[in-house]
Structures are given as structure tokens and as C-alpha cells.
Amino acid sequence: MGKSSVIVIPTMSFINMLLEAGAECRSMGRIHWIDAESGNSWRNPSCVTAFILRGKEIDEGIKTKD
């Protein structure tokens, strides 16, 4: 079996708020955004994360269909 690790890194407060609210996180990789003015792709795109907050109606609807 592998060993467990704990990684502690500084984060911006809004990320902690999303996680505490139960947001799901998905890595989107490096997205090559297009500059609106020039139409050029970003040269050095940063990593992007999607945060998904699900509403109660959706969760309850999914549970009743199972």
C-alpha cells in the first residue's frame, strides 16, 4: 500500500469558501484563452479549475430517480 501525504499550501479565501460550501473541483488543464482585442491565444496559459456547486433541487431529483 502507498503512504498517505498531507500537502498544505496557501490559497485565496474564496477558494476556501467554495470548498466549505461543498463545491466539487475539476481540473480543466491549461486553457488557451483567446484575447478579445487581438484574437491571439495566450502564450503561457495557467492551470484552470472548475468549481461546481449543485442546487438542492438537482440533488433531490437525482436521488428520487434511483
Image: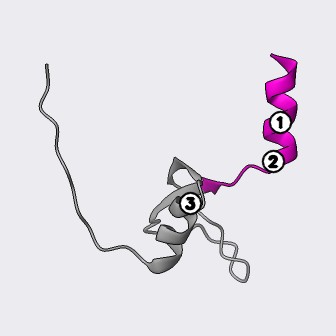
Q: Disc 3 designates what residue?
A: 32
Image: 13 above or below 31: below
Confirm whether residue 42 shows in the render: no
Q: Is residue 63 magenta?
A: yes
Q: Horizontal and vertical percent for residue 54?
A: 74, 49
Amino acid type, mark 2: Lys
Magenta stretch mostly in which secondary structure? helix
Q: Position of residue 18 (x, y in %)?
A: 57, 65
The quadrant of the rendering that contains the N terminus is: top left
Q: Is residue 19 magenta?
A: no
User: From the image, which quarter does the C terminus lie in?
Assistant: top right
Left/right placement of residue 64 relative to residue 5 reads right
Residue at image location 62% in from the left, 71% down from the top: 40
Q: Which three-letter amino acid code belongs to the residue tagged 1?
A: Glu
What amino acid is labelled 3 in the image? His
Residue found at the far bottom of this picture: 37
Q: Nearer the viewer, residue 29 or 64?
A: 64
Of the pair 40 and 50, the residue shown nearer to us: 50
Point 54% across, 70% down: residue? 17
Q: Measure the alpha-carbon separation of dots 1 and 2.
A: 6 Å
Residue topped by disc 2: 56
Give the residues drawn in magenta, as a range.
51-66
From the image, tell me which residue sits under label 1.
Answer: 60
Relative image position of residue 42 (x, y in whole percent): 53, 70
Residue 21: mark in rendering: none
Tag 2 secondary structure: helix
Q: Quadrant of residue 65?
A: top right
